[in-house]
Image (cartoon, rainbow, N blue to C red):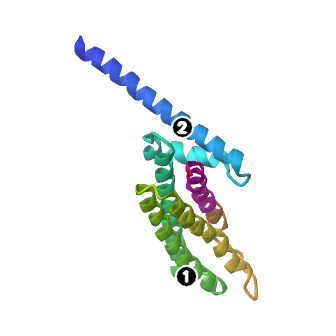
Amino acid sequence: MKFLLYLIVTFFLLLNGFSTAHTLIRDSCKKAAAKNPKFKNDICVKSLETNPQSKAAKDLAGLVVASTKNAASKATSLKGTVDKILKGKKMNKMSEMPLRDCLQLYTDAIDSLNQALAGMKSRDYNTVVTVLSAAMDTPSTCETGFKERKTPQKSPVTKDNDTLYQMILIPLSFTNMLK
């Protein structure tokens, strides 16, 4: 009988924890969207609610860490995508240079995102904002490399860059809310 009671209490405590995380995610995304017209609330909620680490977050700082890791994962994935395009046989030679530039930009963004995680550990929010801002320039700088060629090229990663921008905007907006 005691075991059954223990199971029921544990179940309700876990349910309450998930409910609290769900509320934290939705409320934080909503507040960030209200402060920045470029912030997409639906992307924020979806990306965090599907992330187990976000569900375990107890506060906004925990969401910054989880969303920064999400952004680093997206940047790493995008770097792999560009690397595959560069190694592909059907790659447009006119796109090679901007793609190589994007590859370096993604590497730099990943480094910046890792610096942001280190800054969160020490609660150095000014550094976190600075390095996240640097990382956030990556998608648009990559896209600009295609547009500013003698013969402008269509970027094969525009949609991914748009997503990466949003993924970096999430922890940046949350960090600004912590300051």
Question: Residue 51: x percent and y percent?
Answer: 47, 46
Decide if residue 50 is on the left or right side of residue 34. left
Q: How many marks?
A: 2
Question: Residue 119: x percent and y percent?
Answer: 45, 60
As drawn, which residue projects farthest toward the left?
2
The answer to whether the residue labelled 2 contacts the one labelled 1, judged by CB atoms less than 8 Å apart, is no
Decide if residue 41 is on the left or right side of residue 175. right
Q: Nearer the viewer, residue 93 or 58?
A: 58
Q: Is residue 171 magenta?
A: yes
Q: In the image, what residue occupies the spot 28% across and 19% down?
A: 6
User: In the picture shown, does residue 8 fall above or below 21?
Assistant: above
Q: Is residue 109 magenta?
A: no
Q: In the image, what residue occupies the spot 51% across and 61% down?
A: 128
Q: Quadrant of residue 45?
A: top right
Q: Disc number at residue 37?
A: none
CA gap, disc 2 to disc 1?
Answer: 47 Å
| Residue 90 in sight here | no
Q: Disc number at residue 89?
A: 1
User: In the picture shown, does residue 50 fall above or below 81?
Assistant: above
Question: Residue 7: x percent and y percent?
Answer: 30, 20
Q: Secondary structure at mark 2?
A: helix
What residue is pinned by disc 2? Answer: 24
As drawn, which residue projects farthest toward the bottom?
150
Q: Nearer the viewer, residue 136 or 76?
A: 136
Mark 1 residue type: Lys
Q: Main secondary structure of the magenta part?
A: helix
What's the magenta region?
Answer: 163-178
Q: Quadrant of residue 137?
A: bottom right
Q: In the image, what residue occupies the spot 54% across and 37% down?
A: 24
Mark 2 residue type: Leu
User: In the picture shown, does residue 162 fall above or below 11?
Assistant: below
